[in-house]
């Protein structure tokens, strides 16, 4: 994953270079009210979006028709592709409700099905613990219990994508608690006996003291496939250690509010901002809590009398809520396998609640832009697309008056254009095809990094420096004197693949030998140049 410096820092270094040395450097596109989308960048691969279907605990289960529009991708559907189930401690309850039937249909529609336990069978509790815990002497039986659910579902046409070891082991008021070292021990010794992917640790606040311990233990890390966690009260942040260890990071449970209806606007828009922050943190999946509830993507028909509160809502059982439509602005269009690309901006006063993320399908070249305007006024968003030119943007919007409604297409045919974002709205823009542009490159993308000798050399007072990079990267090109003091920053930012040239003006420097250094990731190359006045 590639992380960009903040606009203010990038601009400051650029402006200082120009002011002090007259340097011509890379153009910085992100201005106030503007977003720059780097189509040749690659962040995380998106695994998907979804919710949980917890039978026995709530009201009406999903019907087969509801499964169709929860996991379908047509107009009026949600486009979910992840379904979370609960593993009851009682195997006799695994067939309750429509759990198997709804999961099977979701699986047949392409959904990833996974499951989490809250408690083990009562016979596996630790009799020596004041807290509810699994007896360490029965970890093998607990692993067998989890694998039995995996087998049960698979035999009924629902192979599980993964199993979690424990739901919220660090917030165990009504369910089973685990200490971080206990989870590590279980993963080390018993996870291999569970014949599916392992998801852990599912901390209620994505507490790193749980997941760091797993990642830092070579055996527990090897036995864990997905780092999952919840974000109640915090926890959304990039996770470089998980990335270094090659683990996907999933947000496996959250709800923004549960004390009021999912149809209240703009309250329902909060989930759009939350999904944006999860995606920008580099996580791969977003999974809501219970899929069918008055505060969830699908309404359960609970009214003011039953709930004891005035929701100001006429939601009917099985209807898609405003919150559901907001989620669909991501899930219908950002499909599994798409990659997030870097979207830098917008910045500036009055833009704090405007969030923009972008995604691409590497096979088709399609681009998807999701823009959340949480501000109370309309915004005109400037867009700069690097390394590609969209032609026609289909647009879909959810606001107080629209429910993921398709609006008129926008003809752009340019890499620079503007979009109108109504107040308190979320809009998804989809380009069917975005051809990659090589404008500005001297040649096609090279096979390796390279830094050339400046020309002319010796020089007075200006010279040109050519360099090449094989893929879009964060690049610095700096000049030092022989004492190692930095005298100029020529490039400091994200640069597209290709051959590049930068001009260096040393009018304010004394004659002498100078060193210039190109750095990108692990690659570093230096050369000398001579200034003679």
Image (cartoon, helix red, strand yellow):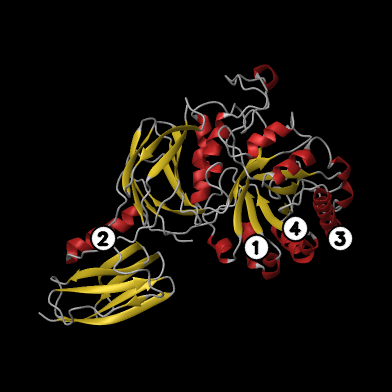
Relative to the observer, which residue lies in front, 517 or 205?
Answer: 517
Label 4 crowd bin: few (<14), some (14–19), many (20+), radius 10 Å: some
323 versus 240 height, above or below:
above
Query: Which mark, residue 14?
Result: 2
409 versus 485 height, above or below:
above
Q: Earlier in the sequence, mark 3 or mark 1?
A: 3
399 versus 123 height, above or below:
above
Mark nearest the camera among 3 and 4 is 4
In which quadrant is the C terminus drawn?
bottom left
* Residue labelled with disc 4: 196
Where is residue 89 shown, x and y percent of the image?
A: 83, 45
State how far apart marks 3 and 2 are (Cα). 62 Å
Mark nearest the camera among 4 and 2 is 4
> For the point 90% across and 49% down, which residue is it?
123
State how far apart marks 4 and 1 are (Cα). 22 Å
* Residue labelled with disc 3: 137
Label 3 crowd bin: few (<14), some (14–19), many (20+), radius 10 Å: few
């Amino acid at each position: 994953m590639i992380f960009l410096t903040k606009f203010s820092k990038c601009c400051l270094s650029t402006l200082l270079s120009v002011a002090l040395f007259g340097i011509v450097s890379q153009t910085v596109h992100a201005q106030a009210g503007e977003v720059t989308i780097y189509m040749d960048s690659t962040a995380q691969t998106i695994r998907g979006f979804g919710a949980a279907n917890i039978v026995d605990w709530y009201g009406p289960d999903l019907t087969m028709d509801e499964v169709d529009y929860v996991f379908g991708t047509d107009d009026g559907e949600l486009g979910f592709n992840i379904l979370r189930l609960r593993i009851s401690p009682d195997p006799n309850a695994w067939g309750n409700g429509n759990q198997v039937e709804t999961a099977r249909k979701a699986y047949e529609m392409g959904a990833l099905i996974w499951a989490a336990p809250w408690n083990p069978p009562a016979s596996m509790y630790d009799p020596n613990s004041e807290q509810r815990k699994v007896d360490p002497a029965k970890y093998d039986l607990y692993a067998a219990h989890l694998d039995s659910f995996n087998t049960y579902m698979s035999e009924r046409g629902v192979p599980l994508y993964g199993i979690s070891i424990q739901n919220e082991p660090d917030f165990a008021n009504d369910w089973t608690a685990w200490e971080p070292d206990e989870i590590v021990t279980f993963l080390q010794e018993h996870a291999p006996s569970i014949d599916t992917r392992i998801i852990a640790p599912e901390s209620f606040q994505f507490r790193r003291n749980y997941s760091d311990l797993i990642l830092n233990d070579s055996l527990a890390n090897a036995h864990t496939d997905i780092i999952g966690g919840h974000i109640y009260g915090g926890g959304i942040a990039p996770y470089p250690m998980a990335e270094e260890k090659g683990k996907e990071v999933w947000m496996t449970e959250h709800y923004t509010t549960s004390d009021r209806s999912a149809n209240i606007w703009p309250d329902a828009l909060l989930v759009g901002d939350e999904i944006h922050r999860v995606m920008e943190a580099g996580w791969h999946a977003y999974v809501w809590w219970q899929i069918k509830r008055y505060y969830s993507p699908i309404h359960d028909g609970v009214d003011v009398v039953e709930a004891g509160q005035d929701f100001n809502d006429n939601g009917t059982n099985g209807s898609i809520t405003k919150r559901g439509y907001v989620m669909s602005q991501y899930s219908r269009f950002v499909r599994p396998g798409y990659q997030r690309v870097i979207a830098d901006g917008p910045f500036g006063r009055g833009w704090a609640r405007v969030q923009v993320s972008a995604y691409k399908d590497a096979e088709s070249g399609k681009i998807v832009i999701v823009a959340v305007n949480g501000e109370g006024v309309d915004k005109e968003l400037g867009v700069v697309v690097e390394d590609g030119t969209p032609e026609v943007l289909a647009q879909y919007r959810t606001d107080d008056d629209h429910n993921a409604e398709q609006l008129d297409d926008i003809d752009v045919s340019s890499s620079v254009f503007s979009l109108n974002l109504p107040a308190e709205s979320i809009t998804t823009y989809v380009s069917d095809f975005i051809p990659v542009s090589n404008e500005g490159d001297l040649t096609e993308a090279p096979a390796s990094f390279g830094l050339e000798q400046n020309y002319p050399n010796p020089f007075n007072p200006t010279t040109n420096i050519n360099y090449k990079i094989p893929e879009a990267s964060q690049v610095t090109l700096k000049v030092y004197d022989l004492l190692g003091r930095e005298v100029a920053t020529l490039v400091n930012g994200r640069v597209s693949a290709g051959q590049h040239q930068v001009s260096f003006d040393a009018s304010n420097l004394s004659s002498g030998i100078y060193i210039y250094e190109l750095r990108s990731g692990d690659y570093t190359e230096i050369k000398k140049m001579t200034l003679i006045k």
